[in-house]
Amino acid sequence: MNREEILKKVKSLVAETLELDESDIQETTAYKDLGADSFDLLELVTAIEDEFGITMDEDSVASIETVGQTVDEIEKVQ
């Protein structure tokens, strides 16, 4: 799966989790700018792990601030 495909899926999961329109979400968008709190991010990580069949490293997850960084992490563990 290439970066664009991963980004599309992540944007969809973010939109669903945060109840936003996908058009409001870009690769450089920070989760704090979307109004996400720690519970939202936990829900998002769980959805990503389920969708991609991966386990994300807790330390790496804690440092993720943007949608693009999420894609980077998925690419690393895929």
Image (cartoon, helix red, strand yellow):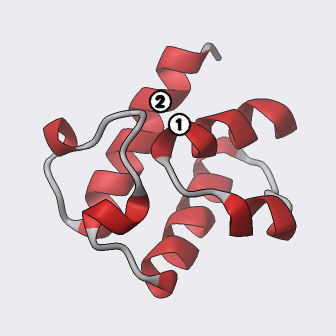
Circle 1 sits on which residue? 68
Q: Residue at x 54, y 28 (%)?
A: 6
**Residue at (27% x, 63% y) in the render:** 34
Expressed as whole percent of the image width and height from the top left, the position of residue 58 reads 82, 70
Give the percent coordinates (x, y) of residue 23.
Answer: 15, 36
Is residue 11 toward the left or the right of residue 34 in the image?
Answer: right
Which amino acid type is marked by label 1? Gly
Residue 44 image position (x, y, % from top left): 50, 65
- Please state which amino acid type lies under the numbered disc 2: Leu
Q: Secondary structure at mark 2?
A: helix
- Disc 2/disc 1 C-alpha distance (Å): 8 Å
Q: Total of numbered circles in the picture?
A: 2
Residue nearest the observer in this picture, 1 or 61: 61
State if disc 1 and disc 2 touch (CB < 8 Å).
yes
Identify the disc placed on residue 37. none
Check the image and name the residue furthest to the bottom.
39
Which residue corresponds to mark 2? 7
Q: In this view of the protein, which residue sits in the foreground, 48 or 3?
A: 3
SS of the residue under disc 1: helix
Q: Residue at x 73, y 47 (%)?
A: 53
